[in-house]
Every structure is written in structure tokens, then in C-alpha cells.
Amino acid sequence: MEASQNRKTVIYVVATPIGNADDLTVRAMNVLSQADIIIGEERKVAARFLKQIGLSKPIIEVNEHTSQTELKDLIHEMIMKPMVYAQISDCGTPSFEDPGVELVQLADEYQIQVIPVPGVSSLMTLIMVAGIPMKEFYYAGFLSPKKEIRNKELKSLLDKYHDHSSIVILDTPYRLHALLDAISSVFSKNTKIILGYKLTMPEEKILRFTIADRKRICGDLPKGEFVLIIQKR
């Protein structure tokens, strides 16, 4: 184990698979095996993942509903009872579009050691197979679920697009078609999209199409995790 042996608290921020369990790194498995406590985004999801890899650990839930007071109480407990913690998200890389950021910020403030254990990222997974130059790009992340606000956000992204930057967008599995429709209402019909659908899973698809062809290419896709790139002009 890489943790300090003088029983000071340490938090490992551990990337977990985004779909294929075989993508868990050897280092991540070692850290999770030897951690005293797992910090998970959702208790049930974390417990299911641990069971899948043959582990059973105490789980503390930290997510968007966790108050600042609760986070500070957790940090205080970490200081008073030194242990090795492993923080995971529901899938992929913690602190990337999930609530893990606040805990890491507080840990730094209270001088608790935080150690990254890198692994799978949906963004980097798609970039690997996008087949386009990605030396620079604009990461837009999750847009608003509200139609009017989302359209305003997309219109503001046109400036990035006009600067010849590719744009990366994530969203929840059930909003893929709504997002593509919204993009089509703002960007030109010949705008090129690269869609990573259910990456690393058996149903994985890497689709390349123009906005005009979106319904023909992916109109029948069922709900599923995705990340997409609006390819630069």
C-alpha cells in the first residue's frame, strides 16, 4: 500500500471503470483492497461495484446533497481517527463532473494528503478514437436540462466553434436526442459530430455524422451513457 505508515489520514482519489470492469487498474484494485473506508457518490452504486470486484468495505456517501457542514464533520473525523480513505464516483474519474471536488478542496485546506489513482475517463476514451486533432478543445461539460437555457448556452458556444475549436459535451443518458435536436437548432446542418455511446461496454458505438444525418445514424439509439464532440470547422 502506498499510504503513509504513521497512521495519518490519506485520501486516495480512485478512477473506476466507465463500463467494462476489466478497465480497473492493478493499482486501483490494490488501493481499494487496502483502504479502510470507501467514499462513494451513491451508496448502492458503490456497494454494487465493490461486490463486483469481490470487496466489502464501509461506505460513506458524499454527493450533491452533502452539506458543507457534513463535509467538515467528515474532515474532522478524518483528522481525529486517522485512516486510509478511497474516494470513487459512480463511474470513471472522481472530481470530474461529480461532487468529489468539495471534499478534495477541504482536505487541502486541512492539510490532509490526497493522492490521485488515475484510470478511465469517458472524455479521454473518446478522444483516443476520435481521429481528429485535439491539441486544443473547449470542454463545455453538462449543459442545462432546461431547453431555453440550454439553447442560450449552445449559442454562446458558437463563438468557440467559430474560433475553430472542437467542443466536448456530456449529458445524462436519457437526454441524447434532446441534446442533438438542440445542437441542430443552433449549429449548421453540416456540422460534424463524433459520438461515443456506451464506451467500453458491449454495445459501444463510435459514430461520426453531420447534424443533418443525426436521426438516420442514431435516431434509434436507446438510453445510454455518452459523450460527444462537435468537430471544429
Image (spheres, grey):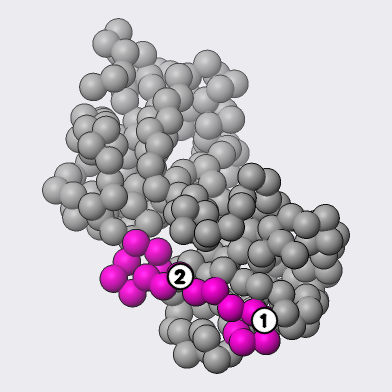
The answer to whether residue 131 is visible is yes
Q: Residue at x 38, y 22 (%)?
A: 10
Task: Say above or below: 27 vs 213.
Answer: above
Task: Say above or below: 9 vs 210.
Answer: above
Q: Tag count in the figure?
A: 2
Q: x and y percent of residue 152 in the render? A: 83, 69
Q: Which corner quadrant of the image does residue 206 belong to?
A: bottom left
Q: Which corner quadrant of the image does residue 90 belong to?
A: bottom left
Considering every residue shown, the one lying at the far left of the view is: 54
- Per the rendered image, the range of residues in magenta is 198-214
- Say what secondary structure mark 1 lies in: helix
Q: x and y percent of residue 39 in the render? A: 38, 41
Task: Say above or below: 205 vs 106.
Answer: below
Amino acid, disc 1:
Ile
Q: Is residue 4 left or right of residue 219?
A: left
Q: Is residue 56 left or right of residue 221?
A: left
Judging depth in this view, the residue of 182 and 37 nearest the camera is 182
Amino acid, disc 2:
Ile
Q: Residues within 10 Å of mark 2 (few under 14, many from 20)?
A: some
Considering every residue shown, the one lying at the far top of the view is: 6
Q: Residue at x 52, y 60 (%)?
A: 130
The answer to whether residue 77 is visible is no
